Image (cartoon, rainbow, N blue to C red):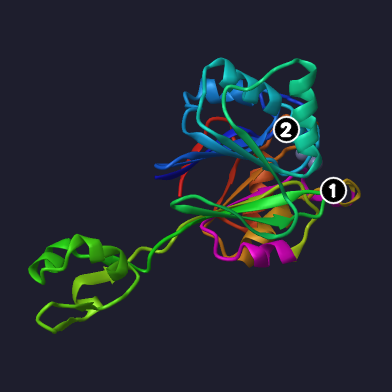
């Protein structure tokens, strides 16, 4: 299971039934919340997404449309008797913001909250099955994108065959890494005899608020699914530039250069009620594009 649900697709303010930015990436192991605009906890409840598996929150930057829902979610989880630890990643001042909000209300959370300030590009976190990297966006203030990648062994064990060669279960991890097995009678069982190539590790790239920057495409090259902000239509390229945002065509160009399979565009400006033109324009450059719509779910 690797599935992404859109919780909020709008920029700046809630408008036309669209919420500010938030997304949930689910795996069997745990869930990752990416940005947490106002109303995120309500959205999680609306789509029946449980907080109990949520162990990691990533905040791209400190514009309100990306984190004003955070303190509400953090305190609600405490009120709901959460006990397992939670990790929050974001720009350094976020740690202070959370602290002051909790202190002012004399709130102490029921669960351990660990804040990790983002400092440089690279791997920031590894769970058993996922590795998360951050990379810089080109926005008016410090802003980060996130790349979620499965950690996969290169080989899968053919258990029926492994049994016929009497390979113990304890050796399966080494088989998955490609090692040969030396049988107790001295025979060498070649790895390829008992394993097959594992399916490719899947990945998802989240590109938050940014100017058009081809370097970003290189950092997320080959990701199966990419989300890229597209605040404006192409005719507003000048405005997008002045406000450190991207257009439909620019988002689609990043997807094309990054050679992804699918692109989601979102972070729509609140001045647009209808979004058909966003889709049509992006598709001119990158055919497999969809609009971020609240409640839509993508299986990666
Ligand atoms: Zn924004
Ligand atoms: Zn922003």
**Residue 126: x %, y % from top left:** 53, 53
Q: Residue at x 42, y 42 (%)?
A: 29
Per the image, the residue denoted by label 2 is: 67
Foreground pick, 104 / 76: 104
Taking the spot 58% from the left edge, 15% from the top edge, the residue there is 79
Residue 44: image location, x then y, percent: 55, 25
Q: From which residue to which does the magenta span run?
A: 215-238
Label 2: element kind: loop
Mark found first going from the N terminus, 1 or 2: 2
Q: Quadrant of residue 147?
A: bottom right
Label 1: state its secondary structure. helix
- Residue tagged 1: 240
Q: Is residue 296 visible?
A: yes
Q: Is residue 2 above or below residue 6?
A: below
Mark 1 to mark 2: distance in Å? 22 Å
232 inside magenta stretch = yes
Q: Position of residue 175 (x, y in %)?
A: 28, 70
């Amino acid at each position: 299971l690797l599935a992404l649900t859109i919780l909020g697709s709008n920029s700046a303010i809630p408008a036309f039934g669209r919420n500010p930015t938030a997304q949930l990436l689910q795996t069997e192991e745990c869930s990752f919340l990416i940005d947490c605009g106002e109303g995120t906890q309500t959205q999680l409840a609306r789509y029946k997404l449980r907080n109990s598996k949520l162990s990691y929150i990533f905040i791209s930057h400190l514009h309100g449309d990306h984190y004003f829902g955070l303190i509400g979610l953090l305190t609600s989880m405490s009120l709901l008797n959460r006990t397992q630890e939670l990790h929050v990643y974001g720009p350094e001042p976020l740690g202070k913001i959370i602290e002051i909000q909790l202190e002012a209300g004399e709130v102490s959370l029921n669960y351990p909250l660990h804040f990790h300030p983002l400092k440089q590009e690279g791997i920031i976190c590894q769970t058993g099955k996922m590795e998360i990297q951050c990379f810089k966006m080109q926005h008016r203030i410090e802003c980060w994108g996130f790349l979620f990648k499965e950690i996969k062994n290169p080989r899968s064990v053919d258990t029926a065959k492994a049994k016929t060669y009497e390979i113990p279960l304890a050796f399966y991890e080494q088989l998955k890494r490609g090692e040969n097995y030396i049988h107790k009678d001295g025979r060498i069982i070649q790895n390829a005899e008992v394993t097959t190539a594992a399916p490719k590790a899947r990945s998802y790239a989240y590109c938050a608020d940014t100017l058009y920057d081809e370097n970003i495409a290189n950092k997320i090259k080959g990701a199966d699914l990419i989300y890229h902000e597209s605040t404006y239509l192409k005719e507003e390229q000048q405005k997008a530039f002045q406000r450190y945002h991207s257009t439909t065509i620019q988002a689609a160009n990043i997807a094309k250069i990054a050679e992804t399979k699918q692109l989601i565009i979102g972070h729509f400006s609140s001045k647009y009620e209808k979004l058909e033109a966003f889709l049509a324009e992006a598709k001119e450059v990158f055919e497999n594009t969809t609009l971020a719509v609240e409640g839509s779910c993508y299986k990666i």
